[in-house]
Amino acid sequence: MGDVGIVVDPAISPASPPISQSINVLVTGFGPFRSFDVNASFLIAQSLPSAFTLPPKEPVSVPGTAIPAPREVRIYVHPEPIKVSYATIRSQMPDILDGFSRTHNGLRPDLIVHIGIASTRRYYSVESQAHRDNYRIPDVDGRSGYHDGEKIWREKGLSPILVPGPAELSGGGNRHNTSTVQTSGLKITPYPTNDHFLQVWKSFSPANTDLRVSNDAGHYACDFIFYTSLALALEEGRDRSIVFYHVPVATDLESLDLGTKVAVALIKSVVKCWVDGE
C-alpha cells in the first residue's frame, strides 16, 4: 500500500472560510410636498452606502459545525424621489420592482425599505403595519387615495391591515399561493416590528438616539406606499420583507448624517431579525 499522507479527522479540521452571502435591498424616498421643498427622506436614501458587510452571528462550538457566512448587504436606491401622489405610487411601484429585476438577473429584492418624513415627529420610527382605508388627505395633485387605493384593494378582498410576514401566510394569516416572480431563495422570516426588533435596532444605532416602533403610518403617502408594497408582495406570493422608516423633517447635515446612520442600523436589524433569526 502506498503512503496516503496524514489523515485529518474532519470533525477537528479547520473549516474553510465561508463565502459571504449577498442580500439585495431596495430603498425609496419621497419628493417635495406642501411646504417641504426638500424631502429629508430622499436625501437620507441617497446618502446610504452602496454596500456593507455584516459579520455573522457567533458559530456554535460543536465539532463539524459549519462556520456562518458573513452577509454582504447591497443597497440599491431608486434614483428618483417618489412623487407624493397616490396615483403615482400605485403605478410606479410595480415599475420600480420590474426595473430592479432587470438589473438583478430577474430577481426581486430580498428586502425593501421605504423612507418618508413625519412632520410632527422629532424621533425615528419604524412602522409595524399599513392601512388599506381612509386616505382622505389630498396629495400634491389634490386627490384623495380612495380611487387609487382603497376602492381597488377592497375589490381585491385585501385585509384592512397588512403587516410584514412570510410568503406562505397572507396578511390575515391564510395560506397563499407560491411566488409568481423570481426570488433569490434567501430564507427570510419577516414579522411585524416589535419591542425585540426595537432593541436590536438600538444596539446598532448611535447611543441615545430616540427610536420607536409605531403602529400608525399616517394614512397619507407613507402609509399608502407601505400598503402598496405589502399588497404587491402578497399578490406575487413573495415574502413581505418590507419596512417603512419615518424620519424627522430636518435637512441640515448633522440631522441627515444621523438619519443615514440610523437607516443603516435599521437595515442591519432587519437582516439580524428576519434573516439570521436573532
Image (cartoon, rainbow, N blue to C red):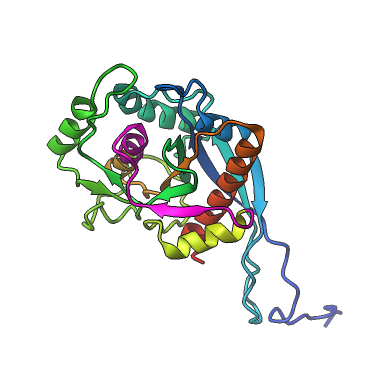
Residue at image coords 15%, 31%: 151
The residue stretch that appears in magenta: 206-229
217 magenta-colored: yes
Q: Looking at this view, is 94 or 67 the one in front?
A: 94
Where, by quadrant of the figure, is residue 60 drawn? Answer: bottom right
Q: Looking at this view, is 252 or 5 the one in front?
A: 252
Where, by quadrant of the figure, is residue 194 drawn? Answer: bottom left
228 magenta-colored: yes
Q: In which quarter of the image is the N terminus?
A: bottom right
Q: In this view, does 187 lie to the left or right of 137?
A: right
Q: Looking at this view, is 177 or 157 the one in front?
A: 157
Q: Looking at this view, is 213 or 24 the one in front?
A: 213
Residue at image coords 66%, 38%: 254
Residue at image coords 45%, 54%: 212
Q: Is residue 59 above or below residue 139?
A: below
Q: Is residue 48 visible?
A: no
Count of numbered marks:
0
Identity of the residue furthest to the top in this view: 141
> Residue 161: percent from the left, percent from the top?
24, 48
Where, by quadrant of the figure, is residue 8 drawn? Answer: bottom right
> Residue 140: percent from the left, percent from the top?
34, 19
Q: Is residue 257 visible?
A: yes
> Residue 73: percent from the left, percent from the top?
60, 47
> Residue 58: percent from the left, percent from the top?
64, 71
